[in-house]
Image (spheres, grey):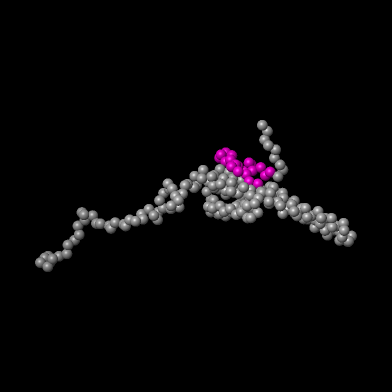
Amino acid sequence: MPPPARSIFDPRVERFLIADEGEVVVDEVAKHWAAIVKPVLLLVASVPLLMLSFVVPPQAWWLPAVLAIGLAVWSMWRILQAQMDRFVITNMRVFRVHGILSQHIATMPLSRILDISLHRPVLGRIFNYGHFVFESAAQIQGLSEIRYVGSPNERDLTIQRVIARAGLRGPVNRQTGAPMGGPMPPATAGAGTRPSPQVAPASEERPEAPGPNDTMPIPRL
């Protein structure tokens, strides 16, 4: 069966996988359509702006024409940027691929993910998108915030499942909040016990002080 056809906007993330180490894609996230709403509206607005060049005085026809062309080029560039942006979840890491002429790749191993915050604005709750904020041991440029992620709740659960399956986080005790089955922290390993005093060995003899009736030997000259 032939592979599915790919568009020219597909960054082909399979090229960046560590295939010989068994890395596979768990989820590939493209930008939600809400990310291109603003560029599309500006692209539509460039059409009437271009029409103004036919009604303004002949000496100033070029001004609305240049503005309309610049606005249209900027809008199409932003749309293409959103189409080429991918956030990828694998069984070993998360990484982001974005860029048109020059491509940028930001990678974060699963072991460095400390916390994931999900922000869903009002429109995001209506149209089912949100923004992810990653907190890691070392903040990586390009992966600190992933915007316009579709189905954010499902993607958050996917990342949590991958981290759990990798053995990086175990089940948590609901009463103490500590991981279950792990080693006892050093600060609480000896809680509630007092150190026993040091006792000298029984075989050790201590010197006795001389009594009042004892005589001191006189050395001979």
Q: Is residue 95 left or right of residue 38?
A: left
Q: Is residue 46 left or right of residue 11?
A: right
Q: Is residue 146 magenta?
A: no
Of residues 176 and 29, the one drawn nearer to the viewer in this rendering: 176
Image spot of residue 137 (x, y percent): 53, 54
Q: Is residue 76 left or right of residue 58?
A: left
Whether residue 144 is visible to the viewer of this picture, yes or no, is no
Image spot of residue 208 (x, y percent): 17, 62
Image spot of residue 153 (x, y percent): 58, 48
Identify the residue at image location x=21%, y=54%.
Answer: 202
Whether residue 176 is visible to the viewer of this picture, yes or no, is yes
Residue pushed farthest front? 126
Q: Is residue 23 magenta?
A: yes
Work out which quarter of the rendered image holds the N terminus and state it: top right
Identify the residue at image location x=31%, y=57%.
Answer: 195
Image spot of residue 121 (x, y percent): 63, 55
Identify the residue at image location x=45%, y=51%.
Answer: 174
Find residue 139 and report its image quarter: bottom right
Q: Is residue 130 left or right of residue 203?
A: right
In the image, the segment drawn in magenta is: 10-30
Work out which quarter of the rendered image holds the C terminus and state it: bottom left
Of residues 208 and 185, the one drawn nearer to the viewer in this rendering: 185
Residue pushed farthest right? 58
Residue pushed farthest top? 1
Relative to 213, say whether 204 is above or below.
Answer: above
Identify the residue at image location x=80%, y=58%.
Answer: 67
